[in-house]
Amino acid sequence: MKKGLWAKFVQPDGKPTALGKKLIATGNWPLIEGNKRAGKSDEFWGMEFDFTGGHNNVKLSGENKLGMLLMEIRAYLQSQS
C-alpha cells in the first residue's frame, strides 16, 4: 500500500505529483480515512464514524492506517519544499 501511495503522490525525483500538491494543501490537518460499505467498514485502513450521539459527540473506531500513511507522505513532501 505504501509503495502504491508513494507512486500516486510523489514523482521519481521526489517532487509532488498533482495529487501530491493537493495532499500538501491539507496543511497539518489529521487525515482520517472514513469508509463504510453495505453496513461494513474497514477498520484497519480506515475508521468508522459513529454519530449516534450527534455531531458534537462523534465516536471513532479503527486503526486509520491509510490516513497515517497519507500523513507520512505529506510530511515528506512538505519537507522537500
Image: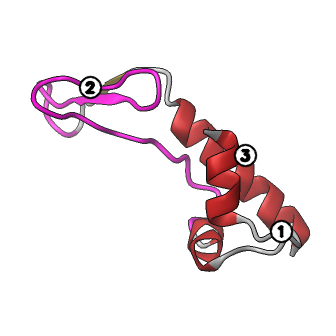
Where residue 60 appears, as percent x and y from the top left, is 35, 25
- Magenta residue check for 62: no
Q: Residue at x 54, y 41 (%)?
A: 67
The residue to which callout 3 is attached is 72
The residue to which callout 1 is attached is 12
Q: Residue at x 22, y 34 (%)?
A: 36
In primary-sequence order, the first of circles 3 and 1 is: 1
Quarter of the picture holding the C terminus: bottom right
In primary-sequence order, the first of circles 2 and 1 is: 1
In primary-sequence order, the first of circles 2 and 3 is: 2
Q: Residue at x 64, y 76 (%)?
A: 21
User: In the drawing, does residue 58 fall left or right of residue 31?
Assistant: left
Q: CA distance from mark 2 to mark 3?
A: 23 Å
Q: Is the residue 48 above or below the residue 12 in the image?
A: above
Say few, some or many: other residues with alpha carbon within 10 Å of mark 3 (under 14 / 14 to 19 / 20 or more). Answer: some
Amino acid, disc 1: Pro
Whether residues under marks 2 and 1 lie with C-beta atoms below 8 angstroms apart, the answer is no
Which of these two is toward me, 31 or 21? 21
Q: Residue at x 29, y 37 (%)?
A: 35
User: In the drawing, does residue 20 fall left or right of residue 61?
Assistant: right
Q: CA distance from mark 3 to mark 1?
A: 17 Å
Say few, some or many: other residues with alpha carbon within 10 Å of mark 2 (under 14 / 14 to 19 / 20 or more). Answer: some
The residue to which callout 2 is attached is 41
Where residue 61 appears, as percent x and y from the top left, is 36, 19
The residues colored magenta run 26-55
Q: CA distance from mark 2 to mark 1?
A: 33 Å
Whether residues under marks 2 and 3 lie with C-beta atoms below 8 angstroms apart, the answer is no
Amino acid, disc 2: Ser
